[in-house]
Image (tube, rainbow, N blue to C red):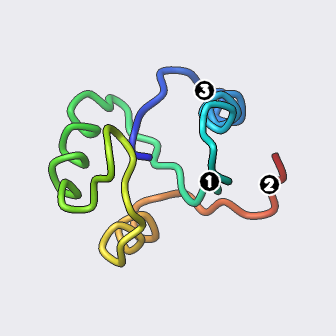
Amino acid sequence: KIGRSSGDNIRERFSIIRTGCPYNLTLIGIQIQRPYKGLEAELHKKFRKSRIRGEWYNATDDLKSYIKENSRKITGIKW
């Protein structure tokens, strides 16, 4: 899922998303961007070929590479 949250509580936001999804989800990256206006639209455009539906995307090699290069590492977090 490529989306944004205006709050600082990532754990709570992830929990809400996970509750509404029938699949097991894994958080693989967080990109902190302030101001983040426009970033979400840019990413949706950049990865449009990987879009499944709405803000949900297949984890293609290009998307995983972007996440690896631009996100904070997520390690040891058990939600």
- Choose the circle earlier in sequence order: 1 or 3: 3
Residue count near mark 1 (Cα–Cα under 10 Å), binned few <14, some 14–19, many ≥20: some
In the picture provided, is 42 more to the left or to the right than 57? left
Residue count near mark 2 (Cα–Cα under 10 Å), binned few <14, some 14–19, many ≥20: few
State the mark number for residue 77. 2
Q: Position of residue 46 (x, y in %)?
A: 17, 56
User: Is 55 rendered above or below residue 52?
Assistant: above
Query: Which secondary structure lies at badge 3?
Result: loop
Q: Quadrant of residue 22 in the image?
A: top right
* Mark 3: amino acid: Asp
Circles 3 and 2: CB atoms closer than 8 Å: no
Q: Position of residue 26 (x, y in %)?
A: 64, 56
State the mark number for residue 8. 3
Name the residue tied to disc 1: 27
Q: Position of residue 58 (x, y in %)?
A: 38, 62
The answer for how far apart the CA atoms under marks 3 and 2 are is 16 Å
The answer for how far apart the CA atoms under marks 2 and 1 are is 9 Å
* Mark 1: amino acid: Leu
